[in-house]
Amino acid sequence: MHLAAAARVRYNTEKSKRGKHMIQVSRIQIPALPTKKPRRLYVYLPRDYAESEQRYPVLYMFDGHNVFYNSHATYGKSWGMKEYLDRKKPDLIVVAVECNPEGFRRMSEYSPFDYSAPRPLGDVQGLGKVTMDWFTKELKPEIDRTFRTLPDREHTLIAGSSMGGLMSLYAAVAYNDVFSRAAVLSPSLWVSPSGLHDLIRETPLAAPTRIYMDRGTGEIDPKRRALVGMFNVAKRLVDMGADVSVSVIPDAVHSEAAWEKRIPDFMRYLLQ
């Protein structure tokens, strides 16, 4: 993949009171994850990027179509990440990749493990490793070549929610030599919990490793198994040397609007 050669569908430069930001949106293909439809790649550049010589940390995000624009979001509501970045103006590049836009393939691409689910999914092949190999071996090197990044692990972050939250946790552990910090919102820990615990137990974590995890009490979890599972995962991560922040959000549901409200919390924790 070459960003310069990707089909550019939108290049947006907006002025603010204290400089400019840019969001570049391109159409890309991921050969290792075949789909007939191209997916969108979003790159948010901080204010005054074009006028400075500064290098920046990079935050990678899953479900990129839901990150910046309501008009692109699956349910018509994005995370509002653009508004947060415009307001707070952190020295940070954000790279967000759209999930597979065909059918239920997202559930395969965003799982590190094979698993069984109710219909219409049934047995699902976990292609999370293929997804993260592309992120780390294709996407990240191209981002580092194209933009002025700080490419070391200490300045490389990752974030996601739901299945994307599971993938962010997986990335922080299995690709700990690449990512030092992760935001794991409302993670789908029901996908092969034994596989996840085995992975954490068997993987040494470098310092620093910082992981933010949360879940809302308004999410579907009648017996609180997901909440208990989140705390069990957090304890195992701490045992392996990670710094972990765990939050339970009263009444919060499983939605982009709910995750938007938590942006200040996880960004403060990851960037402090």
Image: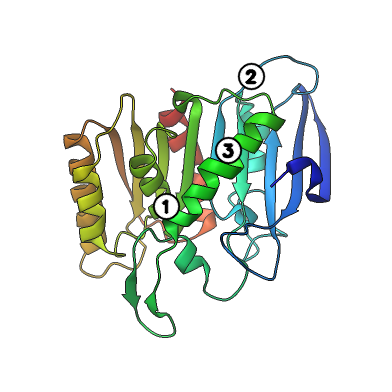
Whether label 1 touches label 3, CB < 8 Å: no
Residue corresponding to mark 2: 55
Whether label 2 touches label 3, CB < 8 Å: no
User: Tag count in the figure?
Assistant: 3
What residue appears at the point 40 percent right and 65 percent down from the top-left corner? 126
Query: How far separated are the C-alphas under marks 2 and 1?
Result: 26 Å
* SS at mark 2 in the image: loop
Residue corresponding to mark 1: 167
Of all residues, the one furthest to the top in this rendering is: 53
Image coords of residue 53 (percent x, y): 72, 14
Q: Amino acid at mark 2?
A: Arg
**Quadrant in which residue 181 is drawn:** top left
Image coords of residue 111 (percent x, y): 40, 61
Q: Nearer the viewer, residue 1 or 269?
A: 1
Of all residues, the one furthest to the bottom in this rendering is: 119
Q: Is residue 86 visible?
A: yes
- N-terminal-most mark, 1 or 3: 3
- N-terminal-most mark, 2 or 1: 2
Q: Is residue 71 left or right of residue 208?
A: right
> Of circles 2 and 3, which is in front?
3
* SS at mark 1 in the image: helix
**Quadrant in which residue 142 is drawn:** top right
What residue appears at the point 42 percent right and 80 percent down from the top-left corner? 121
Q: Amino acid at mark 1?
A: Met
Q: Residues within 10 Å of mark 1 (few under 14, many from 20)?
A: many
Image coords of residue 174 (percent x, y): 35, 44
Q: Is residue 80 visible?
A: no
Image coords of residue 149 (percent x, y): 62, 25
Query: How far separated are the C-alphas under marks 2 and 3?
Result: 15 Å
Residue 136's mark?
none
Residue 140's mark?
3
Applied colour scheme: rainbow
